[in-house]
Each structure stands twice: as structure tokens, then as C-alpha cells.
Image (spheres, helix red, strand yellow):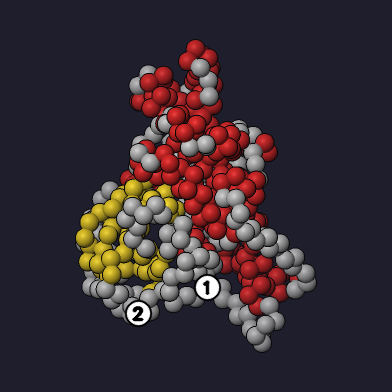
Amino acid sequence: MNPADRLRIASILDAALSMDEPEREGYLQVKVAEFPVLRAVLDGIGPAGTFLRNFSAPDDDEAPAEAEEAERAGEAAAPFAGNERFQVIRVLGSGGFGDVYEVWDRTLAINIALKVVRNVRPEVIASFKRGFRALERLSHRNVCQVYELIFDDGSGAWLLSMELIRGEPLGHYLAARAGEIRSVFRQVSEGLHALHQRDVLHCDVKPSNVLVTAEGRAVILDFGWTLRREDMLSSPGSALAITLGYAAPELGHGSPHTKASDWFATGEMLRRVLEHDPDAVKAHRLSDLASLAVWLTERDPRQRPSEEEALAVLAPGLRLEPAKPRENFVGRRECLTRLGDAFAVSAGEQRCVTVHVTGESGIGKTVLVREAIRRIRLRNTGCVCSRRSSIRENRRLSKPWTRWPVRRSSI
């Protein structure tokens, strides 16, 4: 099944969930006639009504739909057995693009979480690396700290080291702690806002991607699909990861992920938590959160609250920093043309072309290259990779980085 079909099916099922049983059955019959692929999906999961009731409360460990291809590619790969630096203790979880292990880091002498990614397409690795670069300098108590991105020659895998969070998925934690709903969702909203302030979209917000520790600290994690907003805008309509039940309806029509789609998923999490324990709304005075959940999950993204309006309810008093406007790029036409021509020659003749950009510090070399890459991505399909040197990225294990990243309590 191709990505477009998966997204269309997600949109149809999302619409069916909002209907009563008789209307739902008729709606699905019409959609099956229009879209025969849907019949195979419904036949494979049992009666539509039963499936949709289960679908309304999916397993917390459900993998993104777009991960199936990567999972199949990785089935033949042996589990990561560790290496001279990392000693595997146990498997923490498995997803579409790899497995996550608790490991002992012999260099740093601590336990960490290690995500092992292999057998995926180059554009996925490029996306993965862009997400890492956007997050490596972010330190926020409600966002899982990422440390290093390493290519391991021995296993042929990319290794992403992260803070080890010992906690329960959000839904499990709050099932017996209704009094902490407001506190946990305040932390989730602050973490999501911290990501958005760096122009980063999570793209797969769901209960299993939020862990809550025994001390009540909520942490957003699993950044396998995290993207810079500029990457989404340069590839409108591209299908990435969705989790049925938490994906915003517009994603099913080919629209790109946005801040609004992240907030839709947050609102859906909140709605389900409150519906699980209706008495909690009155007992803990959560009517404002119940109203916000309905508002955040409006089908039309134009009818949903802005991030500022959502934070006013979820995190009152949070200091909001104004977003920095994108700088307009003026001039340098000749330089941009030469860089564009070099790309055209490289792509057309299938050979490497190197362009040296030199000059004194501060004259705008980095801005020039970024603008050239932005324009190339807008005009071309496929994967355009870029990178900036980092002591925590692309390193070989033979030369480990020995500094421990200083963790701050807030950004």
C-alpha cells in the first residue's frame, strides 16, 4: 500500500469515528465503493463497527503507519548486540525505523537510551539527521535530551544516544492519577512549545511518545520523525508518519504536518484521558481542559486555537517568546546562480561537483549556502542533503567524544 492510500484510509476512518453506528456503516459502504483498497483493510481487521470501537482507543505501542516498509526491511537484521562502547542491557521498544535499547555507556559510565536505525532509505536518514541537529542544543525538562548521533561501522547502523527516561506512557500513568491531569498536560504543552520555538515539528504526538516518571515529570520523546518546518514547506504534500486516531484530518488529504497538527494530536490525547474518567472533570475542575480538547480537535484547522490560545489554558503564566521572523534574502544572484548550476550539472551528469565558498568571517557564507539549498529543494524532487560539522554527529566509534553534555533545567 502506498503512502497516499494509507493517508486516505486514515482520513476516512477518522471521519467514521465521529458518526453514530447506522450512519457510520452507510458512510463506509459508500467509501468502499469509491475506494476498493479500503475493503481489503476492513476485511483484514474484522467487522467495521468492532474495529472502529477498538480504533478509538488504539494500543499505546502502535507504530506509525508509514513505518511498515522500514520494519519489513529490518526484519532480517540481527538485533544490536553492542560494541566496544555500548553494552546492551535490555530492549526498551521497537518501532518502524529501529529498536531502542537501554545500554551501559562504557565511556561515560552511565545508562542511556540508544536508538539503532538501519536499513532505511537515504531520505529517511537525512530527515533523521536534520531532526538531530535541531534538537541537539535544546535542553528542556519536558523534552528528552538527545546526545550523540554515531555511525557504527560494525553493525552498519546509525546510533542515536538519548537521555534514559524511566516512566510510564501518559495514558497508563494518568489512568490512576486523575488529579495530575492538569500538571501533566501543562508539561506536555510546554515541551511541545519548546520544540515549536525552534521551528521543529514532532509529527507523531501520541500517549506512547510521552513518558511520565514516578516524580510526575512528563517527557516528550521518540524523535524518529521530527522535522524542521522548513523541510515540510519545501516538500508540500509529502507523506510521513501518522498514527491512526491521533493524526489530524488534513493529513489524510495530503497537507503537510504543521504546528496545528501537533496540537490536534495533543488535544486528542487530552480528550481521551478525560473521557476515560468522566468524573475527573467535575472532581478536579477540569471543564476548561475538556472545552479546550474539543476546540483543539476541530476538523478544520482554521477553527482550532492558536498555540498561544492553547497555552493560555494549559500553561497559564508561561512566558512566551515571540517567534523570530524569517530573514529576507536580498542580492547574491550571481552566487546563487552558480550554486544552482553546479547542482544541475551534478544531478544531470550523475557526478560529484564541488563548489568552494570562501570569504572572511561574517560576510554571510552560511546564509548564502542555506538560501541556495532552500531554493534547490523547492525546485527539485528527491533528497537534497546538507550538513554542518558537529562534534556529536557522524563520528566513528574509534574516536569517542568524551565530554558529557551539560544539562540545564530549562531552555
Neighbour class for label 1 at 10 Å: few (<14), some, many (≥20)? few
82 lies above or below 398: above
48 lies above or below 172: above
Considering every residue shown, the one lying at the far right of the view is 331
Tell me the element at label 1.
loop
Residue 321 x/y as whole percent: 65, 61
Residue 157's label in the rendered image is none
Residue positioned 51% across, 55% down in the render: 191
Q: Which residue type does callout 1 highlight? A: Arg
Residue positioned 70% across, 81% down in the render: 363
Q: Which residue is mark 2?
A: 402
Considering every residue shown, the one lying at the far bottom of the view is 360
Q: Is residue 106 left or right of residue 252?
A: left
Tell me the element at label 2.
loop
Query: Is 276 or 204 nearer to us in this picture?
Result: 276
Residue positioned 60% across, 59% down in the render: 197
Considering every residue shown, the one lying at the far top of the view is 22
Quarter assignment of residue 329: bottom right
Q: Which residue type does callout 2 highlight? A: Thr
First in sequence: mark 1 vs mark 2? 1
Residue 400 x/y as whole percent: 33, 78
Query: Is 107 or 305 nearer to us in this picture?
Result: 305
Residue 132 x/y as whole percent: 47, 63
Q: Which residue is mark 1?
A: 388
Q: Is residue 107 left or right of residue 254?
A: left
